[in-house]
Amino acid sequence: MEFQEFPMEVVEEKNDVHRILDIQIPTIDPFIFSFRNLTYEVKVGSSKSRFPCCGKKTNVKSLLNDISGGAKEGEVMAILGPSGSGKSTLIDALANRIDKHSLKGSITLNQGFKKGPRPRFRPRYSGFAAVRVTRDGRNSARDGCNHVEETLMFSSEFRLPRSVSKEKNKVRVQALIDQLGLRNAANTVIGDEGHRGISGGERRRVSIGIDIIHDPILLFLDKPTSGLDSTSAYKVVKDSSGSPINLHRFFDDFGHPIPGNANPCEYALDLVSELEETPSRTPDFSLIQQVMEGLRSSFVAAIAGLLPDFFLAFVMSIAIVCYFLFLCGFLVARDRLPRYWLWFHYISLMKYPYEGLLRNEFVPLKCFGKGAAILDRMEVEKLPTPLKDELLSSMGC
Ligand SMILES: Nc1ncnc2c1ncn2[C@@H]1O[C@H](COP(=O)(O)OP(=O)(O)O)[C@@H](O)[C@H]1O
Ligand SMILES: [Mg+2]
């Protein structure tokens, strides 16, 4: 065992027996991998331009749109999303596997790669275990005829520097076999579509072993657990990860706590889909509000200009605004207004922002209760339901 010498300093001398020592243990900066504003667009086909002189126009598809993130040494960053949302594209971009001219943004390791827009990771820095699933649900074998140990040995000779002796390679492979829980399968052939070999979960772990044999700083795994049963999936994740991610805390901070009995990952995916499906109406609502605000000011200014007396203009403005408020639908529903007042309802400058607000807040929501249930919390609770319905409809609900 090697001992490192740390600088020491006597801070305080109490007596001859006890001394307080200030030992300065050097701290080693952890690796920090980060990516900023990754944007990736591809050209997809071309269509005829509407203007003949302009020839064909090329369509551009955005695969990554301003993506940022990062992970510290020892952390696992999981990318969740529905199929086709760009997870594989992001992993390919981070692992430097896509055309560097069309990827914008920066990828840095310890802020070290400052020259170009993104670094060229040397194989020693990163490992990429792309697990491709074949038709029978297995991931592609590297070489189906080899044994697990042979495969890892070959990979270690290929990936570790030549200066590392064969004995050291062997020790590393044996340690990895134990670490990945592959001891029982060490001398079994990997197998492929035509030949029975190790199980699907073991294959994934061999795949990971091949890519971590040189102890890379970064390991990219694309769908490492797809097609595996829960126990094998757990083992694969355990082998490739440190501590579990605190999803609960993240969602609490995000304002959408995960319900006690829900699966955190499924809840996260549902929430993302829900947020994606809900179109943001806020800009429309803000626009209506701005327009109506301007109209209201102009309306009051017009009355002030038309009437000679300031006080009269003041009273008239307030009276008309009161009518606007009364007939806009907030206090009395439109269907309950006498027909001869309907025109005032439509010219009310408060009708439109009010309806905009209602749509903004309530249109995406579904109602799971019946109106009569509202009355169950009141004194009329004991009335028969048809009577409650009648009561509600007479109130215009
Ligand atoms: N080279 C490409 N040209 C055009 N479209 C692509 C290309 N690569 C990926 N896509 C599209 O980008 C989307 C995201 O793909 P992918 O990253 O594989 O999704 P995921 O891994 O999340 O299922 C898909 O709709 C896919 O069809
Ligand atoms: Mg994918």
Image (spheres, grey):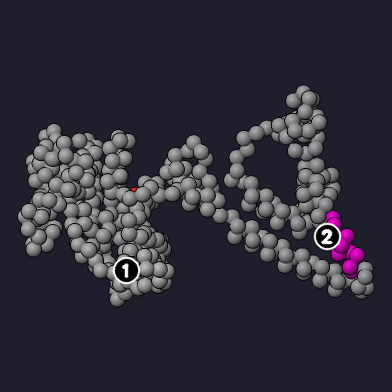
Crowd class of label 2 (few under 14; some 14 to 19; many from 20; radius 10 Å): some
Look at mark 2 in the image and give the residue it sits on: 321
Does residue 103 appear in the picture of this structure?
A: no
Does residue 215 appear in the picture of this structure?
A: yes
Closer-to-camera residue (246/319): 246
The mark found on residue 26 in the picture is 1
Across and down, in percent, residue 321 comes to: 83, 60
Question: Looking at the image, is mark 2 or mark 1 nearer the viewer?
Answer: 1
N-terminal label among 2 and 1: 1
**Residue 140 placement, left or right of 273:** left
Q: Magenta stretch mostly in which secondary structure?
A: helix
Crowd class of label 1 (few under 14; some 14 to 19; many from 20; radius 10 Å): few
The residue under the point 13% across, 33% down is 196
Across and down, in percent, residue 273 comes to: 47, 47
Residue at the extreme top = 384
Secondary structure category for the residue under label 1: loop
Across and down, in percent, residue 195 comes to: 11, 34
Closer-to-camera residue (324/110): 110
**Residue 204 placement, left or right of 104:** left
Q: Amino acid at mark 1?
A: Pro
Q: Amino acid at mark 2?
A: Val
Stretch of the chain drawn in magenta: 313-323
Judge whether 64 appears above or below 54 on screen.
above
Across and down, in percent, residue 11 comes to: 40, 72
Which image quadrant is residue 206 in? top left
Based on the picture, tell me whether residue 257 belongs to the magenta stretch.
no
**Residue 53 placement, left or right of 128:** right
Which image quadrant is residue 189 in? top left
Residue at the extreme bottom = 115
Closer-to-camera residue (99/9): 9
The residue under the point 36% across, 59% down is 71
Secondary structure category for the residue under label 2: helix
